[in-house]
Amino acid sequence: MSKPTSPSKEDLSDLIPRFDQRGMDLDLERMQQALQAMGNPCASIPAIQVVGTNGKGSIASFIASSLKAAGIRVGLTTSPHLVSWCERISSDGEPISIVELRQRLTALQPLAQTHRLTPFELLIATAFDHFRSREVELLVLEVGLGGRLDATTAHPYRPIIAMANIGLDHCEHLGYSLKEITAEKSAVISPGAAVISARQQTEVASILEDKAKHQQARLQWVSPLPENWDLGLPGVLQRQNAAVAKGALESLAPLGWRLNQDVIRTGLAHAYWPARLQTVHWQSQPVLIDGAHNPPAAERLAHERQHWSNQEFGVCWVLGLQAHKQAPAMLRHLLKPSDLAWIVPVPEHCSWTQHQLAAHCPDLSSQLQSADNVEQVFSILLKQNRWPNPPPVVAGSLYLLGDLLAKQTIQAE
């Protein structure tokens, strides 16, 4: 009998429980008690908390890039990751090393077991532990799910709230109406906070305004940045996310940080956030990847296509859609009459099939094809007379994109 192998440094399955075993268990008190047991790391450090449904990661990357350009020591948390757990925790633009991440996770195992921390809570606790050792000056915390009971909300000092677009997603946890979901997300607004938001749906905007008034917070609505602002992230809708980031950065002035416009411009221009309208290559052929995984994100992606050359002749979609997602609604946002969509499984996740989607959307069934994986689709496309133009678009799940990048099926530019 062979000896059991110990996990590699990159494999953290022995330290981070599987999400399907200890996943969505939202409870703020548990996280607060765990942080108290740790000595309340970073409790006195102000945080910009980034909330919303779509665009949170982009806003956080814009903010962190600008703070780095300003020479401010910043700790950043994001989720989910694409390839490595290390992506979720970074300081001054550098992800935590896998060696340090493993060491800190190991040290926090007793705490995690005592307080029954979820994987996300454990990672946020680890992030605060790491940031304390790095003596960061400012935090940028991307909410994982919702807001009211999210682990990042356990941080007691969140004077700035950057509000991304709010729409329907994670309904099984947050509610099945915009009112319910917005209530969960707006609950992060703390007394006297500065809240920056781009345009929201009327119902969402009304709830945000009422919450801000109740908390005596200052709610600032911002317009998309004009074309003369260079952005490191592609896509017309990133101008909205960048405007929220800019507003959050300018709100730091009362806290003692006054960033001039040149520094902010530099930071926004050098921001990097992969798998969001990113051009990659498969066997030297261009491919577009995007993390859209819910109806609002699909609607925004459909809006972006209007700016692509030759899109009116049809777009080839390669979609991996998790079974709990509102896939039929996503299809109706994305597919135009001349489009074709290949449906592939998301590795290691229950996924929608072409047959199931055709049953839900019979009027679109003739535009749906099935494949075992993304590479199979690409091989079929390559045998045709010419590669699609615009390039094929892989979307529907960040887990799918992460798998492609991890296996080097696709290569970033």
Image: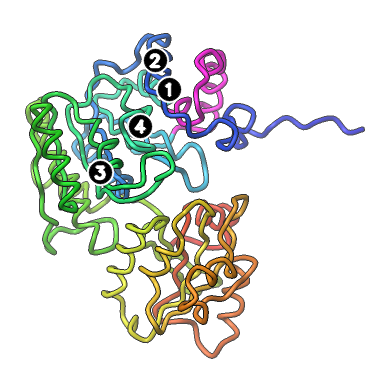
Q: In this rendering, which labeled residue sits more in front, label 3 or label 2?
A: 3
First along the sequence among labels 1 and 3 = 1
Which span is picked out in magenta?
96-124
Task: Give me the C-alpha separation between circle 3 and circle 4.
Answer: 35 Å
Task: Give me the C-alpha separation between circle 2 and circle 1.
Answer: 7 Å
Residue denoted by label 2: 35
Q: The residue tagged with tag 1: helix, strand or loop?
A: helix
Task: Please tell me whether the stretch drawn in magenta is mainly helix, strand or loop.
Answer: helix
Q: Position of residue 29 (x, y in %)?
A: 38, 17
Considering the image in quadrants, where does the N terminus appear?
A: top right
- Mark 3 Cα within 10 Å, few/some/many (few <14, many 20+)? some
Q: Amino acid at mark 3?
A: Lys
Protein image colouring? rainbow
Apparent side of residue 78 relative to residue 226 in the rendered image (left or right): right
Q: In this rendering, which labeled residue sits more in front, label 3 or label 4?
A: 3
Q: Nearer the viewer, residue 275 or 159?
A: 159
- Mark 2 Cα within 10 Å, few/some/many (few <14, many 20+)? many
Q: In this rendering, which labeled residue sits more in front, label 1 or label 3?
A: 3
First along the sequence among labels 2 and 1 = 2
Residue under the image location 22 percent in, 53 percent down? 269
Residue denoted by label 1: 125
Residue denoted by label 4: 91
First along the sequence among labels 3 and 2 = 2
Q: Quadrant of residue 143?
A: top left
Apparent side of residue 377 relative to residue 290 in the rendered image (left or right): right
Q: The residue tagged with tag 2: helix, strand or loop?
A: helix
- Mark 4 Cα within 10 Å, few/some/many (few <14, many 20+)? many
Residue 179, labelled with which disc?
3
Q: Position of residue 32 (x, y in %)?
A: 37, 16
> Residue 108 magenta-drawn?
yes
> Residue 321 magenta-drawn?
no
Task: Give me the C-alpha separation between circle 2 and circle 4.
Answer: 19 Å
